[in-house]
Image (tube, helix red, strand yellow):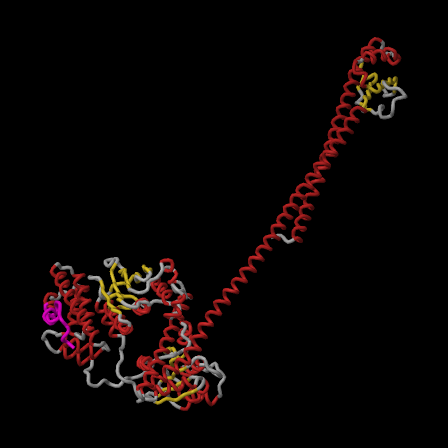
Amino acid sequence: MLHPSHQIRISKELARKLLPLAVSVFLVISIIIPGAYGALEFRRLEHEATTHSKQLAELIKGVAASSPRLWKFQATKYSQILDDFTPYKGILSILVLDEQARPISQLGHFTKSDSLFNQLGIEGKSAPIVLNNNQIGAIRVRVAAAPILVTAIFVFLLCVLTGTLLSLLLYRVPLRVVVGLEQRLLNYQDSLEELVKKRTTELQDTTSKAEAANKAKSLFLANMSHEIRTPMNAIIGMTHLAMQAKIDGQRQRFLQTVQHSAESLLNLLNDILDFSKMEAGQLQLTPVPFNLGSLLQGIVSTLNIPAVEKGLHLTFSTEENLPTVLIGDDMRLRQILLNLVGNAIKFTRSGSIAINVNGENAEAAPTTLHFTVTDTGIGIPPEKCALIFKSFEQADITHARRFGGTGLGLSICSQLVGLMGGRIWVESQVDAGSSFHFTVALQTAEEHLLIESLGKEKPLQGEIKSLRILVVDDNEVNRDVASMTLEQDHRVATASNGLEALIILAADAFDVILMDVQMPEMDGLAATAVIRALEQGLPPREELPEDLVRDLDKRLRGGHIPIVAMTAHAMGEDRELCLATGMDNYLTKPFQPDQLSEMLRSLEVISLPEQTGKETAADAAAAIDDSDSPVSLAQIAAHLHNTTSLNAAQVDQVLASVCLSLTDNLAKAKEALEAENYPDLGRFAHTLKGTLLQCGLDELAAKAEEIHLGTRTNIDLNHEWLLDQLNSRLAGLIGPKDSAGTN
């Protein structure tokens, strides 16, 4: 864009370049052209005068030939010759000269009354009068130049006028055009700058408002979560301790009511947190293998009590031939179903509630399942069916007062279903019930993946005792809850801030530290950074007394104390910040005692006491492999009981999956061997190996691996004999089996 000063500079530069051009055009047209015209005309007149002189010289030569000595005195004859000379009218004067160029006679064609302008003329060159090869005289003619001069003056004036006009046009027109364009450009620039400035201001205002609103929203959610979770931690912890004490039944019921209320409030906070994560695009799914039937049975078991209390019949059914084991986020799928079934119970006075699952494209990958939750409740008006899936919305505002709820549940369900690649909708009539439908896309999985997943649910068992635990929290109630919860089995020390924790840590050794994040003087993140730096032999960034740093360095250098964040902040970025600082785990307040115990078990530095009353996994495997007799379901069940935390129902479920997997893969392996299809034989043998290892059948798994390696390396093995060995040892498991009596 042009600035006004820039515009003036461009105009002056153009004017400076146009001026010489305009002057040159003026000079060429006004002076050079008229001058050239006049010069040509005067040369023409001179040539014409010279020609007249030659013609007259020839005529006078004839007169002189008759009397050579007297020709000079024949003036009358010369006058007659001149009178008879045709071009005489354009001649001003004729001068006759003798042989010595002295005038003999001069004849004029003008009078004394003629003006000097009319007497202006041009002489031609002298023409000699030659007689007998001797020059006896000469003639010189002078012709009139006034007419030519008048014409030349007229041409000159015309050229000056033309040159002046062309020069002005050449100089002024481009300059005016450029100046006009510059002015228009400046006007456009000013309007555009004004528009950009206006739009920029509007955008900045909008962005500022949006950022402020988003920041205020995030701060509100974080602060609300922190402020509510802190007192809730005391409620849940204290009620748990009181319920373990021997007190009268009425007080026990009161405490149970308090605990249930606190847990309901915690569920509400979790809904708000989920909603916030979805709005920020931070909610991520965690796909794991799960059993669909077990998930549905768990939901029915969880909600059957409130359903029965209202006289409702709660059931579920699945379409035949649906995959048993699927891969997906079973926790979020359970959350959707619990919300839909919970709403159905809430809004149904009498009748039944049914959960139905069908496959829309069971043979495709991924598998799309269609879930339907049908009730006989109060129904929803048709115009409200789309509204209920929006945030904070309910079909009828009076329902919030009558039945409770925030209006977040169905909005969360809708967004979760979208994350799972499906959609959700409702079909309903007032007073005739509702049917909530949703679809999700899930992957199918093999049975051994389910076994691995179930076996990892609670990998460590047994009680943990006699740990030295340091609890760091600025809230006295939170310290008391954690201390009294842990003191039953461990030695506990407490600190109210990070600096106090470092002082205690310098004087005593601890197995684990439970560290709050927000504390006065020194927060948990800074204290953790100091501990991790000293463990690595690095100077801490915090300014601490030299003797404290020296004592901490002696105790911490080369070691690693597990530090667990114990905070009321529940946002995902808070967890990442704690782990990035060097903490080993993250526990959100309020927490249940079981969560705390499970977290302690998960720390690798803690050794668990040996189990009693149960054989070890190695013993169970050895008991199975030491014999050549067929393997029984009871042996595998014992192995699963000893090596996992599966309950009896889960063990039965795994045994059924094992039998199905072994039967199917042994049959396919035999068919592949008979068809000499060794790649498929190796694939089925590899699947058998995974299932056998999960069952503790290490020796048989080695035989399956031997077949697998043989097909890959082209080693000539007796695959048929190895398969016969597997079929012989697994004969008791092949085919449909009833596992009911194995527990």
Residue 370: % across, % down: 27, 61
Residue 576: % across, % down: 40, 73
Residue 46: % across, % down: 78, 24
The vertical placement of 49 against 649, above or below, is above
Along the viewing direction, whichever of 403 and 176 lies nearer the viewer: 403
Residue occupying the point 22% across, 71% down: 451
Residue 530 figure quarter? bottom left
The vertical placement of 438 against 170, above or below, is below
Residue 275 figure quarter? bottom left
Residue occupying the point 29% across, 73% down: 306
The vertical placement of 470 against 684, above or below, is below
The vertical placement of 373 against 38, above or below, is below
Q: Which residues are magenta?
A: 724-743
Inspect this view and state whether residue 31 appears.
no
Residue 216: % across, % down: 49, 70
Q: Residue 732 magenta-drawn?
A: yes
Q: Residue 74 magenta-drawn?
A: no
Residue found at the far top of this picture: 66
